[in-house]
Image (spheres, rainbow, N blue to C red):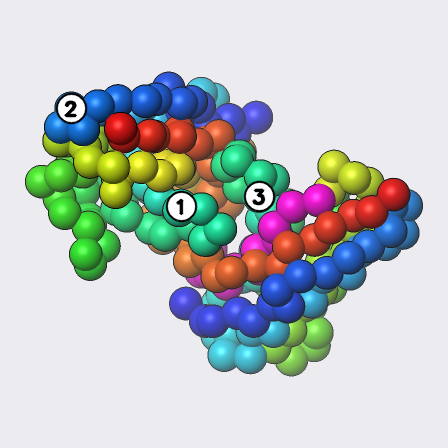
Amino acid sequence: DAKTTQPPSMDCAEGRAANLPCNHSTISGNEYVYWYRQIHSQGPQYIIHGLKNNETNEMASLIITEDRKSSTLILPHATLRDTAVYYCIVRGSNSGYALNFGKGTSLLVTP
Amino acid sequence: GAVVSQHPSRVICKSGTSVKIECRSLDFQATTMFWYRQFPKQSLMLMATSNEGSKATYEQGVEKDKFLINHASLTLSTLTVTSAHPEDSSFYICSADPTSGGGSTDTQYFGPGTRLTVL
């Protein structure tokens, strides 16, 4: 699986959009970009994933650059409950393959 | 949909005892489940891949005789930490890829984790 690079930490004011970047310059054509988050002392929570098109669901939006070498997770209106470590992971879509977690980005949402 | 449960959520045991952790997919079936371990202030580290009806595949450096994995059905995998020692104290998390039932088959879902403390 391709390696990802994320900033170690970010701050965001409550109610504002949180934009979390991820670099995955070695991504291959059949690999997806997945985003998970982990709130303290809980299991990771799936957020969103995409291949090359931008994706949106009830939690977030995922913007993938045209060359697929980077992506941005957008939380449109961050709340205090969005404070967590966010992981960007590249993986093939086939089931049966584990997720390789890097260090992620620790997002702190402040009042 | 796509809920994974773990039991127990927290366990404290004496050194030398064995502890069993259960991981269940509640509304889907999973041929493959995964076990991760997370030490304080660190990321999740894959320990092993649990395959229904066959032997687990362990990551390098993980002792298969110490961390026994059984995946007896499509909804249950168990991790037994044998002869636990204080250095085994950690947060153990399982996950599963749905192969049928609820959830997306190209998304992995995680349990809430089990906090093991070995005295």
**Residue neighbourhood size for the residue with mark 3, other residues' Cα within 10 Å, grouped as few (<14), some (14–19), many (≥20):** some
Is residue B67 left or right of A45 when viewed as pictured? Answer: left
Give the residue type that dot 3 points to: Gln
Residue, far front:
B119
Question: What residue does disc 2 label?
Answer: B17
Residue, far right:
A15
Give the percent coordinates (x, y) of residue A58: 76, 40
| Chain letter for the residue marked with disc 3 in the picture | A
**Residue neighbourhood size for the residue with mark 1, other residues' Cα within 10 Å, grouped as few (<14), some (14–19), many (≥20):** some
Give the residue type that dot 2 points to: Thr
Give the residue type that dot 1 points to: Gln
Q: Is the magenta region chiefly helix, strand or loop? A: strand
Whether callout 1 and callout 2 share a subunit is answered yes
In the displayed structure, would residue B34 be above or below residue A107?
above
Q: Residue at x 72, y 60 (%)?
A: A10
Q: Is residue B20 visible?
A: no
Whether callout 1 and callout 3 share a subunit is answered no
Is residue A42 left or right of B36 when viewed as pictured? Answer: right
Choose the circle earlier in sequence order: 1 or 2: 2
Instruction: Look at the image and tell me in which quarter the N terminus of chain A lies.
Output: bottom left
Q: Secondary structure at mark 1?
A: strand
Asked if disc 2 and disc 3 are in contact, CB closer than 8 Å, the reply is no
Question: What residue does disc 1 label?
Answer: B38
Question: What residue does disc 3 label?
Answer: A38
Q: CA distance from mark 2 to mark 3?
A: 30 Å
